Image (tube, rainbow, N blue to C red):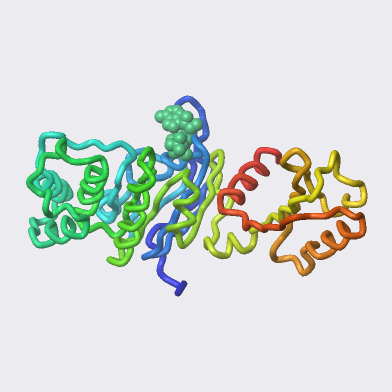
Amino acid sequence: MPRMASIITVSGLTKSYASGFQALKGVDLKIEEGEIFALLGPNGAGKTTMISIICGNVRATGGTVTVAGHDIVRDYRGSRSAIGLVPQELHTDAFERVIDTVTFSRGLFGKPRNDAYIEKILRDLSLWDKRHSKILELSGGMKRRVMIAKALSHEPRVLFLDEPTAGVDVELRRDMWKLIGELRQTGVTIILTTHYIEEAEEMADRVGVIDKGELILVEEKTALMKKLGKKSLTVVLAEPLAAVPPELAEWQVTLKADGHEIEYLFDTQAERTGVSSLLRKLGDLGIGYKDLNTQQSSLEDIFVSLVHQEKVA
Ligand SMILES: Nc1ncnc2c1ncn2[C@@H]1O[C@H](COP(=O)(O)OP(=O)(O)OP(=O)(O)O)[C@@H](O)[C@H]1O
């Protein structure tokens, strides 16, 4: 990815709620203009807190944030007008018509009326034919599109999508992914929170993992998957084994499927993966096999092991 200017800079961000609970413990993060950044984390990790602070809906305890060069506290209006926020919950007046609610949203930011722009976003979001429909007449997917249209109505440079596909079916999720991909073509920077790892895997240029209020990792997605990617080799045995033979100790294999399969996890980046020596050893031991297959670990496996490591540490 070519180097781009940062559009959001978060420095030493902390948040303690009135209860004393520390939801953010000093987060530093730069978001580059034009990228799709996925913020991953388990429930309660602090994703919504962080987004709410950047968008000016929650006040930070410490640290600074700038959006498009505007400090979110000293220059709230400047930073807020650079941001479009698609919240988790759909809240919009059910009886209003699509075009009116989107036009009104733009007005809230004090932007002059621009019918051509509103038409463009409604067309981009496939809502133009529905522009005179009342929100309540729309399908769930269309309602989500209206929320995005509202968030884009004032021409923000950054779009936040908080759990854009929570609770939607697979088809609609794929639709949303396509749509988000198209939005990025318009140059808008997209930050999404998700706990569907597949979503990050599919969409993001970079991934940040937040856990217990700390950003434990920020990395380009492809580099991350390459670096931490593991493969598993499954050996389907001709005859089941009751236990792993001690001779296989150095490979750290596990028995699966009632002793019918051996699973071996290996590092794809290692010079010697140990696969061929393992198979040779099986031959030496007279352990026959019927089939072999390998599987690349997903971002999900990486995420689970990262968050798990944190818990153990
Ligand atoms: N107003 C509040 N007062 C006290 N604690 C809060 C408040 N809002 C959030 N928290 C706590 O802060 C932590 C982080 O919450 P946050 O909503 O940011 O997490 P999240 O990563 O967005 O999780 P989810 O995916 O469940 O939305 C949670 O433990 C939550 O209970």
Question: For the view shown, which residue lies furthest in the bottom direction?
Answer: 2
Q: Which quadrant: the C terminus? A: top right
List x then y, in percent, for residue 235.
Answer: 75, 53
In the picture, measured across the screen, residue 279 lies left or right of residue 89, that is: right
Q: Name the one closer to the observer, 308 or 237.
A: 237
Q: Name the one closer to the observer, 10 or 283.
A: 283
Q: Residue at the location (92% across, 55% down)?
A: 285
List x then y, in percent, for residue 128.
Answer: 13, 54
Res. 16 in view:
no
Q: Residue at the location (44% across, 51% down)?
A: 199
Q: Residue at the location (81% across, 46% down)?
A: 239
Ligand 1's quadrant = top left
List x then y, in percent, for residue 9.
Answer: 43, 57
Query: For the image shown, how many numbered marks are present on the structure?
Result: 0
In the picture, measured across the screen, residue 191 lies left or right of residue 157, that is: right
Res. 200 in view:
yes
In the picture, measured across the screen, residue 161 lies left or right of residue 275, that is: left
List x then y, in percent, for residue 151.
Answer: 24, 50
Q: Name the one closer to the observer, 70 or 279.
A: 279
Q: In which quarter of the image is residue 95?
A: top left
